[in-house]
Image (spheres, helix red, strand yellow):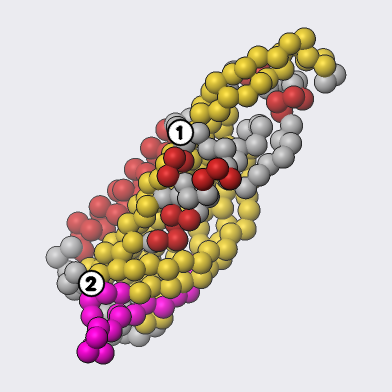
Amino acid sequence: MKKNYISATFIAFFGVLSISSYAQDSLKKAHLILKIAPLTMFDIDNTFQFAAEHRLGQSKRWSLSEELGYGAGVANLWGESNDFGPAREHYRVKIEARRYDKKASNMMGGYLAYELFYKQVNDELNRSVGRECDGGLCAYFENLDYSVSKYVVGTTIKVGYQARLKNEDKKKSKFVFDFYVGLGVRRIMIDHKIDGAATQNNSWFGGDGFFPFGSFGYADRAYNIPHGSFGIRFGYLVF
């Protein structure tokens, strides 16, 4: 259904956007904040997430944030409560434009943000698939090992607040706390990379059956869902 070049296309798009913006604005930036997003490590598609936020040109209100993350199924904190294989990998990319409430915000205070989102999950599955099926009855079953991928793209509008933490002298330190909530939409595309003969007219494979959260189901799917987001980030004001 979807080929591997989908991920390369989206990652290249986000990369070009980020690099272009950085090249044009790097000499004009007054501030740079490096961040981590700890809650993504508790996600069912866990990633270790880094972000960099910088002022967009000479604007006193607008900033741009680039966020990248990678995770593996073997490092999933849910442990034995899932059936993720050792080959499972997660990739997450976010580009976020923020408009702060105050003109002289120094990238602090309340903000409204517009986010572009991309996620890819890859895994290897082993499933018993019916062959030569007719009306639900199959001549025989075959164990198949095959690759599967889930691609997620979307956009989110968020509101949040970012502030510098105080030190023991109750003075503002360079450490930053960032909190946000948001609403958006996600487009999910699932691609079982398996020969068509295994799924065509095959009720043993084509039915979605039980479709648990974080799983791939039993058939290729493409659908939209509403999305709610909540997150915190901890950062350090570099300059």
**Which residue is rendered at x = 14% and y = 65% of the image?**
27
Mark carried by residue 14: none
Q: Looking at the rendering, in which quadrant would you find the C terminus?
A: bottom left
Q: Secondary structure at mark 1?
A: loop
Q: Residue at x 25, y 83 (%)?
A: 167
Image position, residue 85 (x, y; %)? 50, 34
- Give the extent of the magenta segment: 157-176
Q: Is residue 109 among what the camera can see?
A: yes
Q: Is residue 54 visible?
A: no
| Amino acid type of the residue tagged 1 in the rendering | Pro
Q: Secondary structure at mark 2?
A: strand
Q: Between 150 and 212, which is closer to the camera in this rendering?
A: 212
Q: Nearer the viewer, residue 166 or 146?
A: 166
In the image: residue 33, left or right of residue 199: left
Asked if residue 210 lies left or right of residue 105, the reply is right
Residue at screen point 56% across, 32% down: 191
| Residue type, numbered disc 2 | Leu
- Image disc number at residue 86: 1
Mark 2 — residue? 237
Task: Report the side of 27 relative to 13 (left or right).
Answer: left
Total marks in image:
2
Q: Give the left or right position of residue 39, taking residue 130 as reference.
A: left
Q: Position of residue 94 (x, y in %)?
A: 40, 55
| Res 81 quadrant in image | top right
Q: Position of residue 157 (x, y in %)?
A: 50, 67
Would you call the spot at circle 2 few (<14 residues within 10 Å), some (14-19), or many (20 or more)? some
The residue lying furthest to the right in this view is: 135
Q: Is residue 123 above or below residue 225?
A: above
